[in-house]
Amino acid sequence: MQQKVLLITPPFTQLNTPYPATAYLKGFLNTIHIDSAQADLGIEVILRLFSRRGLKELFAQIPDLKIKDLSANSARIYKIRKDYIDTIAPVISFLQFKNPTLAYNICDEDFLPQASRFHQLEELDWAFGTMGIQDKARHLATLYLEDLSDFIQEAVDPNFGFSRYAERLGRSASTFDPLYEALQQQPSFIDSLIFELLEPKLKGITTVCISVPFPGNLFGALRAGQYLKQNYPHITVTMGGGYPNTELRSLKDARLFEFVDYITLDDGERPLENLLQFLKEEISIESLKRTFYQKNGKVCYSIGKDLDVPFSRVGTPDYTGLPLQDYLSVIEIVNPMHRLWSDGRWNKLTMAHGCYWKKCSFCDVSLNYIQHYEPVTAQLICDRVEELIDQTGQTGFHFVDEAAPPALMRELAIEILRRNLKITWWTNIRFEQRFTLDLCRLLKASGCIAVSGGLEVASDRLLKLMQKGVTVEQVAKVAHNFTESGIMVHAYLMYGFPTQNDQETIDSLEMVRQLFEHNVLQSGFWHLFAMTAHSPIGLNPSKFGVERVGPDFGGFADNDLIHEDPTGAEHEWYSEGLKKALFNYMHGLCFEFDLQEWFDFEIPETTVPNDFIFNAISSNSTEKISSNSKLIWLGNQPEIKLSGSNKGTLIIENKTATLQIRFKKEFESLLIWLFEKLQEHKALSWSEFNEKLESGQYPSLNKLQSSNVWSELRHMGLLFV
């Protein structure tokens, strides 16, 4: 029988765009000529549930005896269920950008039924008051869906969530017992929808690969596996993805294999290829690559000897079969970067496998997906970009790198400009000194709209302990360079790092306050430090002054660790105050408030000077030019005219105006040569440029750099990167 693979993402990940794992694997399977299909059961279940038919069936699940036990909010939703049933189809169509004129109706208060989620509108009116009608309508439609989600959780299925399903069962599940017990219960209404949507996809399928990126996908994955094992025992079921990669590396509980046949770790290409070869009896079971399986009631693991597929040869992600036009673009909360995650369709690509830094002490740097760094060329990335544009019709790209390398970002931006690609993109970075203002301007010109990066704890002592390789001053300068270039900056913020004391927590908040006050950051998010088994801290907690106190390993997941910090602050106390302060700072409010205002307990006075960030971003840094630097011109080709015996004029037509720059005749031949080299966004190496200047044919570098024409050209888009 010919092999055919079905790749599925179980409920639930994102509403606005498919999680890319199955598209990555399908792209690889194309390169080895394996027939495959893919499905995002998350969006399919959502669309099936939030339909006229789906809501009718949902409300029919509520027995008369249970109605009287509902909360007042859920009882209200049930009583006006006809209003939800009548409005659901047009609202979903609107969130799919298929029905834009409905925005006017949605913004009228008498169109959408309203429950408790709408109570926050008065508090958020100031935040949304300046929004366009389309955005405001999408936010209201999001609240409407969240009201229904609250109802489902209370009345039908407590495990439901738009971006997670039974997450509490998968998170920190050191023992399989709670999951196993839940899987023995009768399938829920949501489970039945999973089965209904999975069933028609199975014709001719020999292997089902379930990708589980998060704890909130695990239960849905196992329910799907359970259905397959009970009804299609001839189909091989394998599971991989981010959750197994981090949580199941020490797996001992064989009960998991009642739901799947194989579990693969790390990069899925070679393990899947070897598994398919094994199923065709072409290789032995010992040749499986990083694969768990069951034998005689015990969990076995084959590490394999084959090398991984080089990142340059994994193929272009293939989104064929996914309902790209049916995803929902929602606006959940007023956070600029979170909006990018939940609003609009993004093609996912990776510039480089792994992390080029791989030193941060809180990060899982011992795992393959971070430890093994392998970049590809800018040309190959752009080839993949063009393939995806042709395939999906979408020009938005999210590069999902651990930390995109600055040198590769430079080459990518130059290649995007050279090919005249009009794309919109964003990615994750480290706040490297190499992100100069010129490099940021180049990235902006290529279509970069946002970056996110880890500031973590705004304390130089703790940043050193983390081995971040940055200082607060450096982060401020780099983030300022991005902001000055028109690129939004989001900072990941951490509190509760080992040995962090009360003073450092408050000083960190003061740094964050100043960063937002001076518009160095536009977005941020606080999270409490969590110790993981595969990080340097988890592997050697005593080195960082903390003690691991649990959990006891129960044969299943082994990642999230419980620790005690004898010298640190009571970190949980600060959670609400930090988040409340950040919410206001992101909206340009309350910078004048004393930090004590955010906390209902006594805090220390900050020791950070109130002009620290201002001084950091105001200090002049000398332009660093290395032998690897390149010159690039962002504008159109100038026209050079002589206007007298000793004068000339550069005439530059840009998108908004005609600009003229006067120059001395002694610079004429140099400018002609320079712009011939730089036409059509070609890059000129600094070594070639410097060699030309040192030849004696042209004015010296010092004379050039002190000239008005040079200053004007640098301002208008002649960049050193």
Image: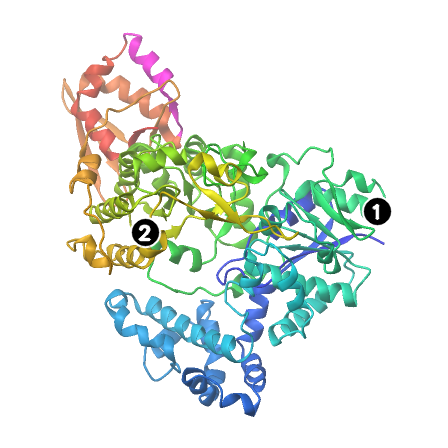
Above/below status of 300 relative to 340 = above
- Most distant residue in the top direction: 696
Which structural element holds mark 1? loop
Q: Which residue is mark 2?
A: 523
Q: Percent position (x, y) of residue 682?
A: 40, 29
In the image, which residues are magenta? Answer: 682-696
Closer to the chain start, of discs 1 and 2, is: 1
In terms of depth relative to the viewer, which is nearer, 697 or 283? 283
How packed mark 2 is, by other alpha carbons closer than 10 Å (few <14, some 14-19, many 20 or more), is many
Residue plotted at (54% across, 88% down): 66
In terms of depth relative to the viewer, which is nearer, 518 or 416? 518
Q: Is residue 686 magenta?
A: yes
Amino acid carrying label 1: it is Lys
Going by the image, does 423 lie left or right of 587? right
How far apart are the two marked residues, 1 and 2, measured between alpha carbons?
Answer: 51 Å
Q: Percent position (x, y) of residue 698?
A: 26, 12
Going by the image, does 521 lie left or right of 407? left
Q: Which residue is mark 1?
A: 280
- Most distant residue in the front direction: 566
Q: Quadrant of the C terminus?
A: top left
Secondary structure mostly taken by the magenta-highlighted segment of the chain:
helix
Q: Is residue 500 magenta?
A: no
Going by the image, does 232 lie left or right of 165? right
